[in-house]
Image: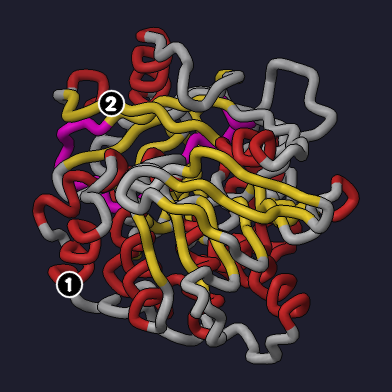
Amino acid sequence: MSTDPTVLVIGGGATGTGIVRDLALRGVDVTLLERQGLGSGTSGRSHGLLHSGARYAEADPDGAAECLAESRTLREIAGACVRETGGLFVRLEDDDADYFEAKVAACAEIGIETERLNADAARALVPGLASSVVEAVRVPDGVIYPSRLVAANAADAAANGATVHPHAPVEAIETGADGLTGVHVGGTVDRVFEPAYVINATGAWASGIADMAGVEIEMAPSRGVMISLAYEGLAPVLNRCRDPDDGDIIVPHQGEVVVGTTSVPVSDPDDYETADWEVERSIEECAAMLPAVADAPKQRTWWGVRPLYEPDEAGTDRRGISRGFTLLEHADEGVPNLYSVVGGKLTTYRKMAAVTADRVCERLGVTEPCTTATTPLIGADDPDRLDAFVERYGGANPTDLDVIATGEP
């Protein structure tokens, strides 16, 4: 009897674990591979924002609406993997008032709930807010704890029959006349899989897996720095209300805040420069919103690489690349049983997984519908159980290392 899964998913971040959970809930025989601990790529090296959609409201209304819908879903199914904080977009006296008005109007058009605040009301909500803040708008942002979210998806998938392998790097891929025929895996697995379908959910590393299979994916990854600072008492996420730029977000944790970020093109997501100016600039710019962070003690600093997909990208400024996602089929390149899902955001991982699982299930003739939007994640309301899942699958990642260590609910 064959021990090969029907579907092999490569990549143990939010999207990969979300796909495995989705397929397992539909009764598909599925296995997940991750070269390190789960969430060790982009998912666990982010700033952990649960997007309301407001950040993209005027520039990408469709993507913003998707964020709004998915953030509401995660609040229903993810329990202590997320935290309700609310968010503020603040305008400083030198920021464009027309941009602020466009932001508020775009949110209203999409259905993102907002509340305008004058400077005094904003400072009453956030003691220590800069004196240069002239107005603000409240939005339903929140915080994601990605280590918990990823581990809970993996544990849920395993409870429904999936196999999850952390520390199992893909070393080679074989193809033949009919497509992909074998996946050589090292690490804790050390075997060759011969699945019916393979899903490449490796994010910024997608082009590397594609190269092994003899297909091409034109990623345009960019690095960004995050710095966790010791700071008590910030309630909402703070966003600078201006065109996206360095140092325009502060995300609250328990006793810490995460500030960031930058956007610098990289050619290799495993080998890139980390520059001191990114740290200094991010703190300086965030201090324009919340001055006390300028002198707050650093707890840890990390860089993440965004999994941006842009086939025609030729420039150096990648902030304008869509944060939407794309599902690629490689049949035209001679590998009809390989799919790649690229782009996207942490907030929309479940939707990315559902779209990918729908396509594969259609090919498999599986008619079970997607239920991930209404089925709570296993252990979602038990922080201790979630943290045990994290430990099982490789430990906490930089974004929420403080939360997992302290067991914050």
User: Which secondary structure lies at badge 1?
Assistant: helix
Residue drawn at x 64%, y 31% as measured from the top left = 243
The C terminus, quarter of image: bottom left
* Disc ID at residue 301: 2
| Residue toward you, 294 or 127 | 294
Kind of residue indicated by mark 1: Arg
Residue drawn at x 77%, y 54% as measured from the top left = 179
* Residue 59 found in image quarter: top right
* Residue 260 found in image quarter: top left
Compared with 281, 292 (above or below) is below
The spot of residue 33 in percent (x, y) is 44, 54
Is residue 240 found inside the magenta-colored segment of the image?
A: yes
| Residue toward you, 193 or 105 | 193
Residue interval drawn in magenta: 228-245
Q: Is residue 238 visible?
A: no
The spot of residue 201 in percent (x, y) is 57, 52
Residue farthest along the bottom direction in this orientation: 368
* Disc ID at residue 385: 1
